[in-house]
Image: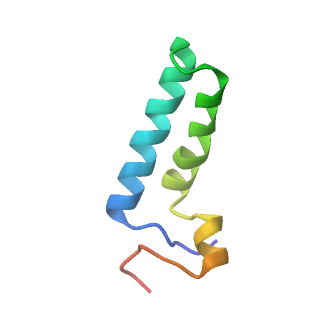
Amino acid sequence: MKVNVGGLDRILRIVVGIALIVMAITGTIGVWGWIGVVPLATGLLKTCPAYSLLGMSTCPMK
């Protein structure tokens, strides 16, 4: 898989993903919080399938 998620984008995805998962565990937002697994995974793997489909990249490296 090609790396297409840059530094700030990656950090925001990880933070938002963890926050959503924690809120789901505590019952604050219900089961919809488990959608936080998606941004967490894309942040950790440094690749986003949606970016690939759209031809986008926030990664400074080519």
Q: Residue at x 44, y 31 (%)?
A: 19
Q: Is residue 1 above or below residue 24?
A: below
Q: Determine the image quadrant of residue 14.
A: top left
Residue 32 rendering spot, x and y as whole percentages: 64, 29
Kindly give the residue lying farthest to the front in the view shown.
29
Q: Residue at x 42, y 73 (%)?
A: 58
Q: Determine the image quadrant of residue 55.
A: bottom right
Kindly give the residue lying farthest to the left in the view shown.
8
Residue 28 rendering spot, x and y as whole percentages: 51, 16
Q: Is residue 62 above or below residue 41?
A: below
| Pick the front one: 41 or 9 | 9
What quarter of the picture does the N terminus occupy?
bottom right
Q: Determine the image quadrant of residue 33.
A: top right
Q: Is residue 3 above or below residue 62?
A: above
Kindly give the residue lying farthest to the bottom in the view shown.
62
Q: Is residue 3 above or below residue 25?
A: below
The number of numbered badges drawn on the structure is 0
Using residue 5 as the reference point, say whether residue 47 is left or right of it.
right
Using residue 50 as the reference point, say whether residue 13 is left or right of it.
left
What quarter of the picture does the C terminus occupy?
bottom left
Using residue 7 as the reference point, say whether residue 5 is left or right of it.
right
Please name the colour scheme applied to the rendered image: rainbow
Kindly give the residue lying farthest to the top in the view shown.
26
Q: Residue at x 55, y 21 (%)?
A: 29
